[in-house]
């Protein structure tokens, strides 16, 4: 397009909605939910925002073959975290992460029916840590571009070769998108490549590189092939504003998102172990191991996995319906009451099985989703309270506590970066271009240092998607 049009245009505006850092986090959380991941290592965890999301208790226990009732319905999937690790080099960030991932002294949100352990580690990712072997998923959002060359060289061997998680998720800025931040012919605003390897202008002063889409694909495919993984490269972050010079492309996103999935065949497993042993033998042994700063344990409710006999559960449900004082109540209203969820041992399947087999209840299965079902108790006098007045249960959605949200939002980007919040959308223009809220990494004194200062806490809604429940196996009696 003719650059002469720029005289009538104030300059390119780039806006993201939701904000770009939220889009990246949503991408990772959705994969964790869909893949039913229970253990996560967040590399470059910064202040622990992602980990804090993962500490939230789901409303019920995950369905397994040992669940003592059939899965006769569809219910939303949630992330059922059982083991979380955070790794970073910045001590101050880790202390904050340790604080916001600690169990609260106040009872709010859903009753927890699954134990969760959280650990915070200080150290570089290039240092192998035996505690991370067996982790299902490793996440590194906006990390790799901050790493010195020798640490980048250790990224795939240590994370994919040594720990060999089922999934590795990482994100990194797309250099191809950067042209959107300046008018054609204008000097790009940003930071010169600090390594001197290129003449590129980066988005952040600590970025050691920013890959084009082709470079990201090339690196990711090579790493996947070398370490026995399949890989998918995609992107998040499209500007909600149209580029005046027509440079919007369906194939260019602000952030590149990469998913590695481990190959499970014997040849890949053997090759992976052999290649890591060879790589480690050539590399100088790291003398400093990771330091474990803090551990937290979220205890499961004492009644977890201990459902009462059917008759007791039916009695508790009838009593709850009477207290609600409504001729019809939903599964949602019933389950949110501790008197019901705990007596079922945390298994929603148990509640549905009792309702299905007890003729005292009439269950209206309106729709395929369990929360659409309504329960009627004919011929019973209704009395009592409205459970929605309970402050501990003022949840807006399955698995989301309003008090938990309020707690998470006490540390807000708006206080540190008010210019980012002048409008509802996240905006980048020629006068202000700062990714500090998402990838403002502080450089360590160590040459291999890396750390992310993600100054944002936005509690996301629980990641639920309705899907058919798996088959069930009755193992023993719970009556």
Image: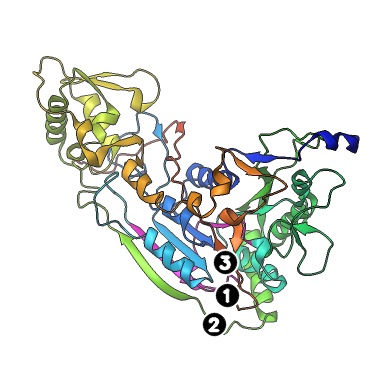
Along the line of sight, which residue is nearer the eye, 47 or 243?
243
Residue lying at 57% horizontally and 43% vertically, measured from the top left? 19
- Tell me if residue 126 is in the magenta stretch: yes
Q: If you read the primary sequence from the N terminus, does the residue marked by circle 1 or circle 3 appear first? A: 1
Residue picked out by circle 3: 451
Instruction: Tell me the distance, in whole angstroms, between the alpha carbons under discs 1 and 3.
Output: 15 Å
Residue 190: name its quadrant.
bottom right
Residue found at the far top of this picture: 379
Q: If you read the primary sequence from the N terminus, does the residue marked by circle 1 or circle 2 appear first? A: 1
Nearest-to-viewer mark from 2 and 3: 3
Q: Secondary structure at mark 1?
A: loop
Q: Are marks 2 and 3 in contact (CB under 8 Å)?
A: no
Q: If you read the primary sequence from the N terminus, does the residue marked by circle 2 or circle 3 appear first? A: 2
Q: Are marks 1 and 3 in contact (CB under 8 Å)?
A: no
Residue lying at 82% horizontally and 33% vertically, measured from the top left? 8
Q: Quadrant of the C terminus?
A: top left
Q: Which residue range is magenta in the image?
A: 116-143
Residue picked out by circle 1: 127
Instruction: Tell me the distance, in whole angstroms, between the alpha carbons under discs 2 and 3.
Output: 17 Å
Instruction: Tell me the distance, in whole angstroms, between the alpha carbons under discs 1 and 2.
Output: 8 Å
Q: Position of residue 471 (x, y in %)?
A: 40, 35
For label 3, the crowd category at 10 Å Cα-Cα, with few meaning under 14, some 14 to 19 and many 20 or more, is many
Q: Quadrant of the N terminus?
A: top right
């Amino acid at each position: 397009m003719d650059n002469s049009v720029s005289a009538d245009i104030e300059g390119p505006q780039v806006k993201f909605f939701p904000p770009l850092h939220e889009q990246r986090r949503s991408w990772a959380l959705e994969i964790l939910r869909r893949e039913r991941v229970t253990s996560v290592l967040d590399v470059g965890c910064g202040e622990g925002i992602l980990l804090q999301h993962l500490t939230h208790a789901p409303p019920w226990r995950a369905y397994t073959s040992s669940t003592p009732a059939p899965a006769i319905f569809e219910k939303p999937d949630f992330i059922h975290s059982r083991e979380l690790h955070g790794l970073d080099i910045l001590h101050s960030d880790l202390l904050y992460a340790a604080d916001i991932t600690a169990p609260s002294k106040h009872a709010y949100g859903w009753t927890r029916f699954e134990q969760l352990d959280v650990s915070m580690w200080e150290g570089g990712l290039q240092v192998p840590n035996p505690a991370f072997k067996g982790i299902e998923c490793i996440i590194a959002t906006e990390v790799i571009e901050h790493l010195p060359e020798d640490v980048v060289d250790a990224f795939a061997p240590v994370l994919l070769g040594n720990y060999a998680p089922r999934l590795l998720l990482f994100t990194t800025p797309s250099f191809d998108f950067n042209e959107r931040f300046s008018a054609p012919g204008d000097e790009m605003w940003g930071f010169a490549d600090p390594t001197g390897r290129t003449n590129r202008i980066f988005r952040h002063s600590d970025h050691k590189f920013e890959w084009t889409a082709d470079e990201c694909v090339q690196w990711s495919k090579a790493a996947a092939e070398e370490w026995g993984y399949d890989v998918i490269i995609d992107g998040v972050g499209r500007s909600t504003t149209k580029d005046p010079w027509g440079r919007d492309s369906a194939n260019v996103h602000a952030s590149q998102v990469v998913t590695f999935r481990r190959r499970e065949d014997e040849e890949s497993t053997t090759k992976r172990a052999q290649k890591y042993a060879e790589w480690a033998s050539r590399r100088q042994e790291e003398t400093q191991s990771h330091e474990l700063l803090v551990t937290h344990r979220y205890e499961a409710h004492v009644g977890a996995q201990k459902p009462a006999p059917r008759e007791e559960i039916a009695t508790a449900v009838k009593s709850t319906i009477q207290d609600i004082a409504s001729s019809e109540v939903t599964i949602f209203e019933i389950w949110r009451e501790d008197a019901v969820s705990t007596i079922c041992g945390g298994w929603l399947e148990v509640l549905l099985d009792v309702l299905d087999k007890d003729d005292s209840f009439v269950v209206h299965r309106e729709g395929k989703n369990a929360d659409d079902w309504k329960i009627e108790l004919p011929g019973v006098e209704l009395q009592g309270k409205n459970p929605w007045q309970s402050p501990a249960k003022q949840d807006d959605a399955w698995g989301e506590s309003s008090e938990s949200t309020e707690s998470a939002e006490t540390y807000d980007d708006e206080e540190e970066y008010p210019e980012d919040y002048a409008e509802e959308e996240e905006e980048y223009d020629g006068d202000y271009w700062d990714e500090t809220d998402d990838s403002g990494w502080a450089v360590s004194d160590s040459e291999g240092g890396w750390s992310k200062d993600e100054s944002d806490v936005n509690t996301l809604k629980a990641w639920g998607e309705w899907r058919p429940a798996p088959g069930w196996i009755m193992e023993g009696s719970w009556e």
